[in-house]
Image (tube, rainbow, N blue to C red):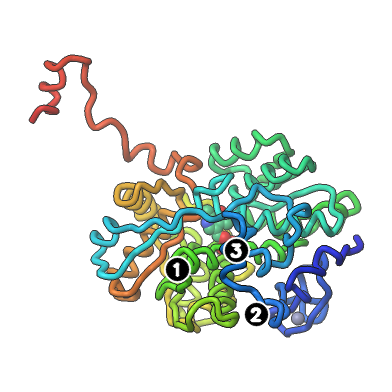
């Protein structure tokens, strides 16, 4: 696979840089450092970023590509592989805030409003735009559900074949919403971590040489897409960074990239300098990053995930160490909640904001509640909670907790008997 560097020429991206040892490599389909095997991320030309203005962004389209000048790809619309995700609602959550005792504004960033109903459309658009430019002819991923959904949809729009890999025990809603786009859906009889390992091995085979696995061989580009969530929140608040953010963690990548976005915005001068605290949310069934934080160690011990928050069930989180670093540096915290708390979290969010979240949003909402109750998160400081996925994909989570409040025949008599008239 030879790299087509021209697509990067008009972007501010300059190289891939090792998060471990700092070694740099040219922008290409490479995800691990040749020196220390550490993960790579995209490094930018600081001067190119510094030229970006609020006016330039505000004149852009109402989707992630308004931030193209801060991304490694996509400055030329003709090169994009995208469903044009982003610019999702930032919902003022006054009722939820009052219930949890907030005196400062509380917001929900609702990324269920993306084209395939999760934040993954952001990362997939950036990864596949890079993948196409790099010459890949098939799109793929190792997924906990939402990623497969998004890759299959992007491939359909682009007219490129796709083959996605998922654990065979995913929620039926996620499997269906992936399969309907017509690509190949491969169910692996194993955990996400086993799916991911298999995909890494497949990238080494001749048969998959021309296949871009968005979160494996083009992962540095994939990860950058998450920054747009941070940019959007700041822009939607009138170019300000909120004091506290609460973010669900699977690999931990999203959390680190929202923090990276805020850091860039301050460095570029697009927002006033400020401090913020990053909080991470996991489920009790898969809490390796939060456990390391609680133990005060950098050693993240992989777990075998269980529980209903399947989209977050990564037992060996690739960006866990960097998520720990973000949370420690900013003075935030991490918590985890069990399946009953997750179900209650979905209902709490829906009942107080009108946002119906999937299990990941239930995790985040329940963790928000726990962080306030334990005094870790300050209800007197402005806070943004991230809902990253849609409840319609995980209906089973709450199916036996909600239903009709009354059942009546179509007559006043029956309505009265049911107590509807007092
Ligand atoms: C993938 C996913 C996440 C977390 O992503 P990471 O970047 O791997 O931490 C959060 N919420 C939902 C709904 C997801 O699908
Ligand atoms: Zn390295």
- Relative placement, left or right, of 71 versus 293 is right
| Secondary structure state at the residue bearing disc 1 | loop
Dot 2: within a 10 Å radius of its alpha carbon, few (fewer than 14), some, or many (20 or more) residues?
A: some
Up the image or down, 161 lies above or below 408; here it is: below
Report, in whole angstroms, how far the alpha carbon at label 3 lies from the one at label 2.
20 Å
Residue at image position (35%, 55%) is: 341
Total number of numbered discs in the rendering? 3
Can you identify the residue that label 3 sits on? 226
Dividing the image into four equal quarters, which quarter contains ligand 1? bottom right
Please state the horizontal and vertical placement of residue 383, each as a whole percent of the image.
38, 68
Up the image or down, 354 lies above or below 325; here it is: above
Q: Sequence order check: which comes first, mark 1 or mark 2?
A: 2
Asked if residue 307 can be seen in this view, the reply is no
Asked if residue 99 can be seen in this view, the reply is yes
- Relative placement, left or right, of 70 versus 88 is right
Up the image or down, 418 lies above or below 96; here it is: above
Q: Sequence order check: which comes first, mark 3 or mark 2?
A: 2
Quarter of image, res 175: top right
| Secondary structure state at the residue bearing disc 2 | helix
Can you identify the residue that label 2 sits on? 50
Residue at image position (35%, 71%) is: 382
The answer to whether the residue bearing label 3 lies less than 8 angstroms from the nearest atom of ligand 1 is yes
Can you identify the residue that label 1 sits on? 238
Residue at image position (55%, 76%) is: 270
Quadrant where the image shows the C terminus? top left
Please state the horizontal and vertical placement of residue 122, each as a whole percent of the image.
62, 56
Quarter of image, res 116: top right
Q: Nearer the viewer, mark 3 or mark 2?
A: 2
Q: Sequence order check: which comes first, mark 1 or mark 3?
A: 3
């Amino acid at each position: 696979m030879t790299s087509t560097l021209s697509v990067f020429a008009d972007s501010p991206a300059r190289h891939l840089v090792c998060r471990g040892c700092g070694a740099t490599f040219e922008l290409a389909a490479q995800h691990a450092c040749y020196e220390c095997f550490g993960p790579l991320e995209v490094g930018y030309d600081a001067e190119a970023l510094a030229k970006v203005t609020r006016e330039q962004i505000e004149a852009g389209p109402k989707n992630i590509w308004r931030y193209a000048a801060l991304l490694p790809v996509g400055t030329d619309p003709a090169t994009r592989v995208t469903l044009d995700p982003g610019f999702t609602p930032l919902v003022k959550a006054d009722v939820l805030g009052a219930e949890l005792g907030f005196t400062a504004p509380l917001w929900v960033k609702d990324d269920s409003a993306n084209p395939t109903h999760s934040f993954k459309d952001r990362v997939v658009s950036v990864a596949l735009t890079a993948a196409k430019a790099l010459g890949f002819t098939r799109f793929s991923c190792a997924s906990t559900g939402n990623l497969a959904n998004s890759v299959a949809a992007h491939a359909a729009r682009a007219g490129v074949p796709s083959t996605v890999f998922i654990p065979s025990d995913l929620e039926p809603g996620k499997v269906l919403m992936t399969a309907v786009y017509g690509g190949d859906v491969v169910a692996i009889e194993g955990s996400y971590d086993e799916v991911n390992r298999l995909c890494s091995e497949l990238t080494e085979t001749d048969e998959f040489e021309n296949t871009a696995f968005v979160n494996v061989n083009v992962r540095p580009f994939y990860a950058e897409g998450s920054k747009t969530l941070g940019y959007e929140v700041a822009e939607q608040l009138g170019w300000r960074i909120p004091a506290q953010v609460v973010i669900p963690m699977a690999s931990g990548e999203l959390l680190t990239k929202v923090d990276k976005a805020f850091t860039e915005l301050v460095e570029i001068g697009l927002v006033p300098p400020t401090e913020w605290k990053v909080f991470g949310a996991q489920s009790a069934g898969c809490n390796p990053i939060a456990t390391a934080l609680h133990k005060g160690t950098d050693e993240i011990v992989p777990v075998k995930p269980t529980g209903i928050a399947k989209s977050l069930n990564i037992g060996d989180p690739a960006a866990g160490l960097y998520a720990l670093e973000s949370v420690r540096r900013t003075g935030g915290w991490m918590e985890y909640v069990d399946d009953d708390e997750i179900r209650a979290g979905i209902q709490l969010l829906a009942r107080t904001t009108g946002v119906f979240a999937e299990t990941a949003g239930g995790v985040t909402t329940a963790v928000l509640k726990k962080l306030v109750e334990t005094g870790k998160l300050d209800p007197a400081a402005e806070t943004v909670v991230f809902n990253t996925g849609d409840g319609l994909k995980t209906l089973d989570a709450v199916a036996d907790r909600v239903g009709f409040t009354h059942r009546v025949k179509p007559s006043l008599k029956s309505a009265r008997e049911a107590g509807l008239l007092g």
